[in-house]
């Protein structure tokens, strides 16, 4: 880790403030390129491989395309340093290997104590008498000042006394923020990473429900972005805006697990508490409860009787079932089709061992509910299973927030039962206000569909505050702005997301669709090309499609563009969220003015229970067909007729 400011050829890298400066002036550089510059400067005496860069900065973030992301970060660093890639002074590329920092670093200079002015000396200097004023005049001059101060203090005191007597203030406790940094796997076996990652996730959930009015906990996705990193507590705290950091490690030996944890206060990096926990795997929940209780006492939380009871009564767990559950969490968090399919099988196996294991049942419900998003199952196949599992989990443990949020998802997207969906979402948020996805789904699966856009944006901003380094969360805020018809804000949010996650293909596809809707077709083609490349489609194929789109636009204008997009959706390779589903095809047909085909596609989407049907009343692309009787009938069937009437 960098221990102090690094000076090189007029530049300064300051780890304390996480800033790059040039001759005293701040050089604006985004977070990821700046992280890269810190990493290379810290290791300036050796070559840093691309694999090491990827692991240190992105960890296992599945949304990152390694080559593109690293190349983009290097390019931005060079732009900030005005470094010529053909004749570099600061960053030298070793083809096929990595990068070296070659800037001329100036030796650190220790400050001369004689140059510093202690605060006491400064106060003495400020309190010295003015030699140009006589002592008698000086004393006389002070009287009006002190008299005025005394008079103001007297009046203020009388007012405050009366106010205090009438309405004693009730101070609102300030909400502290904490991040659980990824627990380190000390087993020596990378295959045991799922145990450390699962421990991190479970402790985040445990701490998040302790005293939500006093303690906010950063969500897992943002926490895991620091996995394998070398950032110090001060830098992490600055980036996340937290007051406390929890670090830990996990070591497993057969049926025993040893967890070491320490709580750090961000303001001065003081270690407030540290402890070792050694338990049988069957007592892992008790271990987590003991850890959570210890932390609650150190940061002076007020635990309600039910929370105290829950911590005290942590039940034993079947080690084999818990192990499968953690493996399932690890695979589900990949957010890929194979990962979700594996997670569903692992949750099912855990439940087969322990049929009353509520967290595994709730996780299975969540896996089923989002399986259609990655193409693992259709909504008609998965949603009834998700509903059954969610209800079973809630019956076993009514305080399980994830069970309620999943049931709310089913009620909204599959049954169009909006009152029941709201009840479940609010229960989930009440049980765990630190669950970013509970806020996200309440926003995009209930508030936005019902046209409550200001509330939806507010919920999404809460989700972003809890999980600031989550690409899906940042990206969905852009979608929320689109539904609220705040297109400029939507575009700005997508651009912010692209800066934070340059390898997140979905973000570029959303930008492409928004820019096309705004009539910026040339820009839309550029963004669509990026999305295809980042999705893994071959470069030759992508460039051919880009040329075809530009030719169609030049020849036939917007209609030519949409006709070519329609043609491309029928091909095998498409980026995520391409308009190839019945709901997406309805958008294309609406843009082409082919109302009958648009309505036929929406009817098919309804029959298939497409998750996107909840967006029908708020999708701006449907304005041209909104008055059609068949469209109004669809609105009525999804219980959104009143919302559709507003647009």
Image (cartoon, rainbow, N blue to C red):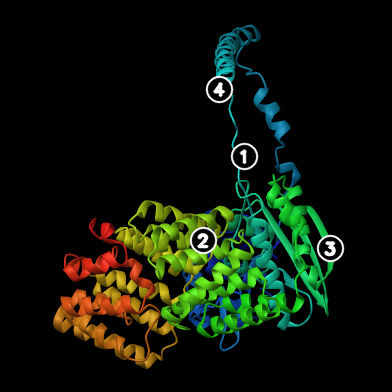
Work out which quarter of the rendered image holds the N terminus and state it: bottom right
- Closer to the chain start, of discs 2 and 1, is 1
> Which residue occupies the foreground of this view, 251 or 101?
251
- Closer to the chain start, of discs 4 and 2, is 4
Marks 4 and 2, Cα distance to the nearest angstrom? 37 Å
**Residue for badge 2:** 438
- Closer to the chain start, of discs 4 and 1, is 4
Side of 361 relative to 482 (left or right): right
Question: Label 4 neighbourhood size at 10 Å, few (<14), some (14-19), many (20+)?
Answer: few
Tell me residue 89's x, y (percent): 55, 74
**Residue for badge 3:** 276
**Residue for badge 1:** 173
Disc 2 to disc 1: CB gap under 8 Å: no
**Residue for badge 4:** 167
Marks 1 and 3, Cα distance to the nearest angstrom? 31 Å
Q: Secondary structure at mark 4?
A: loop
Q: Residue at x 16, y 68 (%)?
A: 628
Tell me residue 202's x, y (percent): 67, 66
């Amino acid at each position: 880790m960098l221990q102090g400011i690094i000076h090189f050829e007029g530049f300064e890298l300051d780890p304390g403030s996480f800033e790059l400066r040039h001759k005293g002036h701040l050089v604006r550089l985004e977070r990821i390129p700046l992280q890269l510059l810190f990493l290379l400067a810290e290791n300036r005496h050796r070559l840093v491989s691309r694999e090491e860069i990827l692991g240190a900065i992105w960890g296992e973030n599945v949304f990152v395309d390694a080559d593109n992301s690293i190349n983009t970060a290097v390019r931005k660093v060079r732009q900030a340093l005005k470094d010529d890639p053909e004749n570099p002074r600061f960053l030298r590329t070793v083809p096929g290997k990595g990068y070296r920092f070659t800037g001329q670093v100036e030796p650190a200079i220790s400050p001369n104590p004689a140059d510093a002015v202690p605060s006491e000396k400064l106060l003495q200097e400020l309190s010295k008498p003015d030699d140009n004023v006589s002592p008698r005049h000086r004393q006389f001059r002070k009287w009006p000042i002190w008299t005025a101060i005394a008079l103001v203090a007297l009046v203020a005191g009388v007012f405050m006394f009366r106010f205090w007597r009438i309405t004693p203030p009730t101070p609102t406790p300030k909400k502290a923020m904490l991040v659980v940094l990824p627990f380190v796997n000390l087993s020596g076996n990378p295959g045991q990473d799922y145990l450390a990652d699962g421990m991190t996730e479970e402790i985040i959930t445990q701490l998040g429900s302790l005293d939500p009015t006093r303690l906010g906990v950063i969500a897992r996705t943002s926490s895991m972005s620091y996995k394998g990193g070398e950032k110090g507590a001060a830098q992490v705290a600055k980036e996340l805006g937290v007051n406390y950091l929890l670090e830990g490690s996990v070591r497993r030996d057969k049926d025993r697990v040893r967890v070491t944890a320490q709580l750090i206060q961000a303001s001065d990096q003081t270690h407030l508490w540290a402890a070792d926990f050694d338990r049988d795997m069957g007592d892992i929940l008790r271990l987590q409860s003991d850890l959570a209780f210890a932390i609650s006492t150190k940061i002076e939380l007020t635990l309600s009787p039910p929370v105290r009871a829950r911590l005290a009564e942590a039940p034993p767990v079947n080690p084999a079932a818990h192990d499968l559950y953690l493996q399932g969490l690890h695979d589900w968090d990949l957010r890929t089709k194979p990962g979700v399919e594996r997670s569903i099988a692992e949750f099912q196996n855990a439940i087969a061992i322990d049929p009353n294991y509520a967290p595994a049942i709730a996780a299975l419900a969540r896996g089923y509910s989002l399986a259609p998003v990655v193409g693992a199952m259709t909504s008609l196949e998965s949603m009834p299973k998700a509903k059954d599992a969610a209800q079973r989990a809630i019956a076993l443990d009514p305080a399980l927030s994830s069970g309620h949020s999943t049931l709310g998802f089913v009620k909204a997207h599959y049954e169009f039962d909006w009152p029941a969906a709201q009840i479940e979402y609010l229960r989930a948020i009440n049980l765990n206000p630190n669950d970013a996805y509970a806020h996200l789904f309440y926003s995009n699966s209930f508030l936005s569909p019902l046209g409550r856009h200001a509330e939806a944006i507010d919920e999404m901003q809460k989700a972003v505050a809890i999980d600031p380094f989550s690409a899906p969360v940042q990206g969905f805020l852009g979608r929320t702005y689109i539904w609220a018809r705040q297109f400029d804000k939507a575009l700005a949010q997508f651009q912010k997301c692209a800066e934070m996650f340059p390898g997140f293909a979905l973000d570029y596809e959303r930008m492409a669709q928004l820019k096309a809707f705004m009539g910026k077709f040339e820009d839309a083609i550029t963004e669509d090309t990026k999305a295809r490349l980042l999705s893994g489609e071959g470069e030759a194929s992508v460039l051919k499609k880009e040329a075809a789109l530009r030719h169609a636009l030049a020849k036939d204008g917007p209609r030519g563009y949409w006709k070519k997009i329609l043609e491309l959706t029928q091909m095998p390779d498409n980026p995520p969220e391409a308009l190839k589903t019945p709901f997406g095809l309805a958008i294309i047909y609406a843009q082409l003015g082919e109302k009958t085909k648009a309505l036929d596609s929406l009817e098919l989407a309804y029959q298939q229970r497409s998750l996107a049907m909840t967006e029908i009343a708020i999708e701006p692309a449907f304005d041209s067909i909104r008055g059609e009787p068949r469209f109004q009938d669809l609105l009525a069937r999804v219980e959104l007729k009143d919302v559709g009437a507003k647009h």
